[in-house]
Image (cartoon, coloured by chain):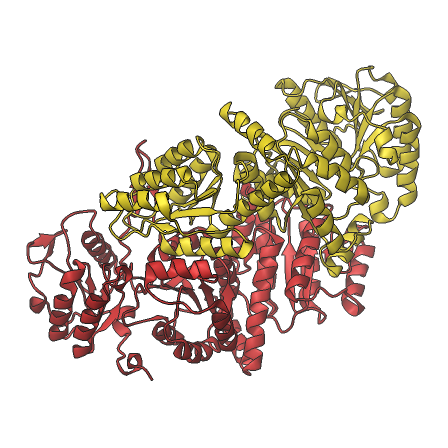
Chain colours: A red, B yellow
């Protein structure tokens, strides 16, 4: 076991009892001001339970709050300190925090190993080790959680454009169940912006920066039992402790899915990564093998990362690879089928009872005369909302398939209210343990609202058939991992119980 | 040469002199009503130059317009007829249209080969052949062009939700320079919805349906010299005339890029395609080889199709594979580098003059002290708008690279107005013959506005580094094709002259 395991005490990062801002500032644009303001606001709202203490030798009050002149004067309940002072001052700050008995720090400041100042980073670590104080960072954007109210994202929330418009610039996702650990602050905040827009809720965001102490391994371990976190996302450029990563990830993944976006896949990419993180990255094959062994699902870009996150948080893994597709657009069905086959899912022709039921419906005029009941089930441009609902139900009840993709292109006349259709379908889907994904293509109001309604109802929606099927495939791969570990049933049961309580 | 070449006369599909609606209806939801209304509206607006004539034996006026009781009574200027009567009546209609001397028809009606009624489709073709009348369809959604004002998309434009909201459902893209030929009506209309939302302008949309007569080959040929069309998109499930396709596409592609999304790539996908189009599709390898030979760029889903369309319509192909990346987010740079390398583009380390210029800027404090000037050029979270502008200019002026990717994550404090930055960068880019792409990740207002401003300025923008680099790669591949054909210089010159006239 490495030294990381001997020192623990991660709790203050999740639920601090008192937060100090070392380097609190009166200047509105400075991180030391923005972070203080964010924390005070969340404290005022009652989201952040911990009191907040600014530290600055040259100020009496900031934002109407008493400023502490020195760390030694801080009250004893401080267990988390955010450090925003210049890099060269950090070792001294660390010593004083250690002496004060503070347990955890987040070093926002940059100017350490990422620019070649390994000496300074080592000095900080030495100081920390003396007192057992934990470090997140340095060179990071810290922590944000809509649950705990800790928010250190010092980037401008709004931007005022020259033409007078004030536009949202660094939005925060709402409360949810997806955790994000990012080695890059920029990618992390861009990812939060993406999550916000996609309506994906967050549990915790950790920007690990240079990983002087706390790294993804320890955060994974800590998130394993964190109640609000159901899915864990990683953005990584390097893993320093490969063996520990595999060990811990393999253990955590049996309980919660881990999805990793690992940049630096190519030689040129690794060179680029090394130049800005000062860490050597192994070849991609090594990471690929490690992820596979540990049951970590790999995403290849930010879009995939969140496409996967959406389905993992809302749907249980399928019992097998057999996918049923229902659509009012034949071409969309073909594209979904292609992607399924390419990835190794199956789109079996329907036979037996399922087919008989659909044929019976067609005979009775409950499906269009010329619909195809094979799979994809193509209910054509003459489809109605009722037909979608009836067909989806048949497919969910079928023992011939393990998952269902509903490609409900809203444009057809027979869907008078695509939002209502999405709501109905999501309601039905929630009664089954088979995963369901939805697709509607386009950016008209109708398309956006239909997709949003599916998402709200717990059926992840996508703007193309390919993205939906790929997400389903990732979920299937996770199911395979769970089965290999003998944990599939346990996971699905827990998932369904959570869902039945309406927790999603 | 097949029979398709002997009969020509495609002009009425592009610029009709008079349009008849065979099967015009008083019932508001019927295609025969919607199409008539759309045409009359466009005529009233002056967009559609041709007069519009409804035909229906049982009506006197519809929408205030005189109805013709029979085809024989139609005025002689009718050269295009839209047919929406039931399938069984179409042969008779075709005969009468032929006798009347009408030159072109669009058969919206379904109920032909796609449901096994090959006999009926043959009968219609026989009738058409007698008079040399051309057919688009049957079983299609017809034609739409914001330039000609022809609009046959009979799907509800708005939908009234049960809660009273009236939402846009089948929007039309604005005037532009991308043509779309689709074998699937559903995919076609979904694609138009997508184009609308992405702000990609359309020249012509053709839904070819069962391709009883006019097919993608002939439309490609016709679009070759159509002045508003600069890029041609194809959605295909099968190509009946492979040899002619290659011949014509190879010829057209030397003048205008052709991007194809070919569904039915897998065996299961082909089975699905066959079931709804009644056509046999060849193996994917055959298509792949045909596309490569003909210089057709292949997209693998709708997202890629339009990601590619955006860059082809706004940027010239690069002279070589060397990509420069500038970013304020190191991780984004790594991801862009990875994708470039994976696809076969190069991200060369900068040396010589380019590097010297950047180092000089850093020395003077015009770039952050800790920026990386290798490539990706990482100007870090301390980047300002001015730094982005200066760096981009250096890279555009460099003879070490052939293309530039600007990954300007808007969140950093140094970009006070991301919209202005995008405007400035696009202005600079338009002065160079090197292609430029832009990236900003997220869905905050700031992200959306920044990307939109890049698009407006002619620099295609993408929400992830990977999508941007892939689009650039597709453009590079097209450049390779042009070079092989000795047409690169000619194409780029024409492109740049078009751009200098502000035509984009």
Query: Total number of numbered labels?
Result: 0
Res A317 seen here: no
Q: Position of residue B501 (x, y in %)?
A: 51, 22
Q: Position of residue A316 (x, y in %)?
A: 55, 69
Q: Nearer the viewer, residue A49 or A334?
A: A334
- Name the outermost residue toward the front: B352
Residue at screen point 29% across, 46% down: B359
Q: Nearer the viewer, residue B238 or B224?
A: B224
Quarter of the image holding residue A108?
bottom left
Q: Position of residue B478 (x, y in %)?
A: 61, 42
Q: Nearer the viewer, residue A190 or A453?
A: A190
Q: Position of residue A61 (x, y in %)?
A: 9, 53
Q: Is residue A138 left or right of residue A338?
A: left
Quarter of the image holding residue B142?
top right
Res A404 seen here: yes
Q: Is residue A10 left or right of residue B393?
A: left
Check the image and report above or below for A5 versus A265: below
Check the image and report above or below for B203 versus A339: above
Q: Is residue B310 left or right of residue A226?
A: right
Residue at screen point 64% across, 36% down: B486
Q: Quadrant of the N terminus of chain A?
A: bottom left
């Amino acid at each position: 076991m490495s030294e990381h395991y001997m020192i623990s005490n991660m709790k203050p990062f999740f639920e601090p009892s008192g937060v100090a801002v070392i380097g609190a500032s009166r200047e509105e644009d400075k991180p030391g001001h923005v972070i203080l303001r964010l924390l005070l606001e969340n404290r005022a709202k009652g989201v952040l339970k911990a009191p907040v203490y600014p530290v600055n030798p040259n100020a009496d009050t900031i934002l109407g709050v008493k400023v502490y002149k020195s760390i030694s004067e801080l009250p004893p309940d401080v267990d988390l300190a955010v450090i925003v002072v210049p890099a060269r001052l950090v070792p001294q700050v660390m010593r004083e925090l250690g002496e004060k008995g503070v347990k955890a720090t987040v070093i926002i400041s940059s100017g350490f190993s990422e620019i070649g100042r390994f000496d300074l980073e080592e000095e900080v670590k030495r100081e920390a080790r003396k007192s057992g104080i934990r470090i997140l960072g340095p060179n990071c954007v810290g922590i944000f959680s809509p649950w705990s109210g800790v928010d250190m994202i010092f980037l401008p929330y709004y931007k005022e454009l020259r033409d007078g418009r004030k536009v949202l610039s660094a939005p925060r996702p709402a409360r949810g169940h997806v955790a994000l650990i990012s080695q890059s602050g920029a990618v992390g905040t861009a990812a939060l912006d993406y999550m916000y827009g996609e309506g994906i809720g967050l549990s915790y965001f950790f920007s690990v920066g240079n990983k002087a102490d706390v790294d993804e391994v320890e955060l994974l371990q800590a998130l394993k039992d964190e109640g609000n976190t159901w899915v864990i996302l990683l953005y990584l450029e390097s893993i320093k402790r490969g063996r520990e990563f595999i060990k811990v990830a393999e253990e955590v993944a049996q309980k919660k899915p881990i999805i990793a976006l690992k940049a630096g896949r190519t030689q040129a990419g690794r060179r680029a990564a090394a130049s800005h993180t000062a860490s050597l990255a192994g070849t991609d094959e090594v990471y690929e093998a490690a992820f596979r062994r540990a049951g970590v699902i790999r995403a290849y870009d930010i879009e995939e990362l969140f496409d996967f996150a959406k389905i993992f948080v809302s749907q249980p893994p399928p019992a097998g690879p057999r996918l049923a597709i229902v659509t009012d657009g034949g071409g969309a069905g073909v594209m979904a089928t292609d992607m399924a086959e390419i990835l190794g899912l199956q789109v079996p022709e329907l036979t037996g009872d399922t087919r008989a039921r659909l044929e019976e419906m067609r005979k009775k005029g409950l499906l269009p005369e010329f619909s195809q009941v094979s799979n994809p089930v193509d209910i054509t441009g003459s489809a109605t909302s009722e037909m979608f609902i009836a067909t989806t139900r048949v497919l969910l009840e079928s023992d011939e398939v393990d998952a269902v993709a509903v490609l409900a292109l809203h444009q057809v006349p027979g869907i008078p209210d695509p939002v209502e259709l999405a709501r109905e379908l999501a309601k039905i889907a929630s009664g089954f343990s088979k995963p369901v994904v939805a697709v509607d293509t386009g950016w008209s109001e109708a398309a956006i609202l239909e997709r949003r309604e599916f998402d709200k109802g717990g059926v992840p929606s996508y703007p193309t058939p390919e993205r939906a099927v790929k997400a389903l495939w990732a979920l299937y791969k996770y199911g395979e991992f769970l089965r290999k570990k003998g944990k599939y049933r346990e996971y699905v049961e827990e998932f369904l119980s959570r869902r039945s309580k309406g927790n999603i």
